[in-house]
Image: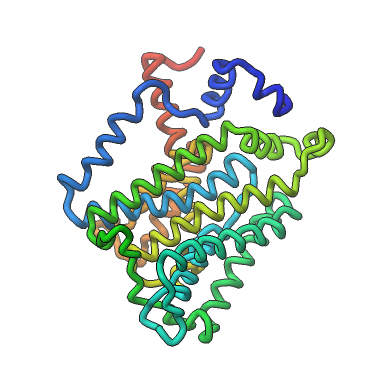
Amino acid sequence: MASITEQRDAPAGERGAELERRGLALPRGWAYLPLGLFLVAFPLFAGEFWTVQIGAYSMILGVIALSLMFLAGYGGMVSLAQMTVAGTAGYFFAIFGTSSEMSISLGWSPWLSLPLALLVATLFATLIGLLASRTAGIYTIMITLAIAVAFFYFTRQNYELFNGFNGFAQIAPPAFFGYDWNQPQLFYYLTLAVAALCYAAVVYLGRSTFGLTVQALRDNQRRMRALGYHVTGHQVAAYATAGFMAALGGLLLVFLNGRISPGTIGVGPVIDILIIAVLGGLRHPIGPFVGALAFVLLDNFAIDLIERERFNTVIGLCFLAVVLFSPDGLLGLWEKARRALARGGRPRS
């Protein structure tokens, strides 16, 4: 494994080829221009349901799953507490701001409550990182799951701060710059902007010194420690970075639903984020958004074919099929199909 300095000094073409081999590079040329134009124009011809419940909701789940992809895909740290961090941001925005429970909510200005909610959630993610960085592999999964479950029951049983089972309702997005962000098209574009910024940030971090260090720690912590890198410090910083992204997604989720309750951060939603990330693919930042879109489409239209209670069975079978036939998720299937077309459909010799 090359050192971080050697990777940075490598020619740009070689670094790009290596990133492309890993599935981490952006498509070359103008490949994203048609997609970008389609996403921008989507609300102009789609109805409110497709704009908000499909488009915006998919991007919100994609942002939260992207935070997991950053930890697991780049750092090899599978955290099941990303929805918990997202829910923390939503809860504290309701506590600091306004909601249906003004006996608990402080009624502060959105200009203050929003950044404070992001700060609290990021600090919580940092604390999770301090605990999880002492473990590895299955133990990281178990400790983050334990934190998620503990926080779920804490919010459900605490009425003084989190209002227990009922949570908070009537939470509206801030009226920044005089616009009503509850309006479907405006909310869609707000979500699109946040998703695009988070995606660009992950792509940039993946190619930065910090991102390359995190990837090197994933491959060989002992060697990186021998080279003088602070392993725990970089891992905690990765958790904090992913936590900030998850918090952004959590705030958007609260704006979409207008409420936050223990059901938002239950075991089901926690596992859903893992399914979304793996379903789309953990090797490229676009994977979580692909997985989120597939998940939301199944969630909305599977009931036309099966009973609602059997949705988890369907999504579980899809998850198993993707894991068995394409460990790299739906992006892996796309890559296999692309290579098969490039070979003219002929099997490899």
Colouring used for the render: rainbow
Would you say 181 lies left or right of 162 here?
A: left
Residue 74 sits in which quadrant? top right
Q: Nearer the viewer, residue 108 or 150?
A: 108
Q: How many marks?
A: 0
Furthest residue toward right: 226
On screen, residue 132 above or below 267: above
Say if residue 301 shows up in the picture. no
Classify the position of the N terminus by image quarter: top right
Q: Position of residue 20 (x, y in %)?
A: 52, 24
Q: Residue at position x 61%, y 53% from top?
A: 240
Q: Nearer the viewer, residue 333 or 236?
A: 236
Q: Position of residue 343 (x, y in %)?
A: 41, 14
Would you say 7 lies left or right of 110 here?
A: right
Q: Position of residue 117 (x, y in %)?
A: 50, 65
Q: Position of residue 163 (x, y in %)?
A: 47, 83
Q: Residue at position x 68%, y 39% from top?
A: 218
Would you say 312 lies left or right of 186 here?
A: right
